[in-house]
Amino acid sequence: MLTHEELAIVHLVLNTDCNAWDLPKTAGSPGVCRFCYRERNRVHTDEATVRRVIDRVRAESEARRIVFTGGDPVMPYDNHLEPALQHAQAAGFETNLHTNGLLLADRYAGLRDHVTLYSLAVDGPDEQSADWFRGDGYFTTFRANTALLAADRRRLAFNTFTTAASLAALPSLAETITGLAARTPVEYWLISQYRPIGRANSRKADLYAYDREAFTQAIAHVRGLLSGTGIQVYDQPTRAAEDAYPFRVWVLADGTVTADLGSVAAPRNTVLGNLLADGFEPLVRRAFASRSTTDTSTTTSPDKEVTAP
């Protein structure tokens, strides 16, 4: 049995598609979500298999929360999100829905009673800055989602990507988030810098890469602004190719388990096996043993202990 100290959070991937790619870019934007390093493909599974995957994780770990992630799990096809959330909740897990929210309103009625935490992406405090990252109309949808969720007293979290220019807007975004926290519980805010993990390219670096010290200073300022609110601020700074990446294990909805074993330069995660055939605990312990470098990072993030793509 994996203890809670070894494994507090499991990230479950229902699909790696994301509909944000379909949004039109704004004037001057590099194109929608060009910082993203996800590969576009589907995870092929069925409802019974998803339930078996969740049951195996429950039987072999003391993890308390499952993060439903992707891509975006709230996609316009049946990826078994609603029954998976219900089954995870019935198995005793907290559930974190990690989504861009573009289709959240369409499926909210079926999700509402089975989601512990809604984690929404937003990269700026206004339409101009937020839409530059995510596409035309994104911020309008974000505001509609937060209005809906706050009125319903749902628990929220946020994740933000940055550029050197957008760092100056973080205090304004902090003000937006504290305003929401006055209306509904807000658990955390994850702020990220460009992470050139194997699929990096020079164009992305030109757009998104900047000095790590500037990021660190901006995070320190934001933490000061949110001091006393109870909102945890987590950060993911950039890393050089020789730096170890925070240890991550990914569980796909078909049972495949992969792991980031530490190298920023690796083109993709290492496939460890399928938990339905090989067991969940043995695969995670194999990942522990196989980690190629010692993680000396001081980064704190809500998914550092175990993650999935």
Image: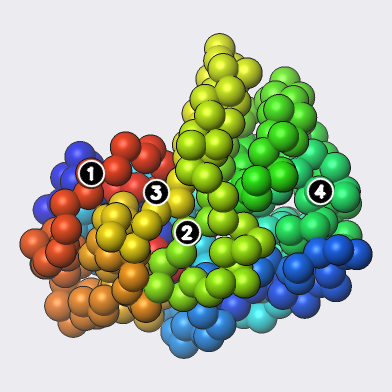
Q: Amino acid at mark 2?
A: Arg
Q: Amino acid at mark 3?
A: Asp
Is disc 4 surrounded by few (<14), some (14 to 19) or many (20+) residues within 10 Å?
some
Task: State whether residue 18 is above or below residue 176.
Answer: below
Whole-percent x and y of residue 258?
Answer: 29, 73
Horizontally, residue 112 falls left or right of residue 191, namely right
Q: What distance separates the C-alpha of mark 2 from that of mark 1?
A: 16 Å
The tag earlier along the polypeptide, 4 or 2, is 4
Q: Which residue in the protein does label 4 denote? A: 129
Callout 2–callout 1 Cβ contact below 8 Å: no
Whole-percent x and y of residue 199?
Answer: 46, 75
Callout 3–callout 2 Cβ contact below 8 Å: no
Tell me where residue 81 sits by quadrant. bottom right
Q: What distance separates the C-alpha of mark 1 from that of mark 3?
A: 16 Å
The tag earlier along the polypeptide, 3 or 2, is 2
Q: Residue at x 62, y 38 (%)?
A: 156
Q: Amino acid at mark 1?
A: Thr
Q: Secondary structure at mark 2?
A: loop
Q: Residue at x 71, y 43 (%)?
A: 166
Q: Which residue in the protein does label 3 denote? A: 303
Q: Which residue in the protein does label 1 denote? A: 296
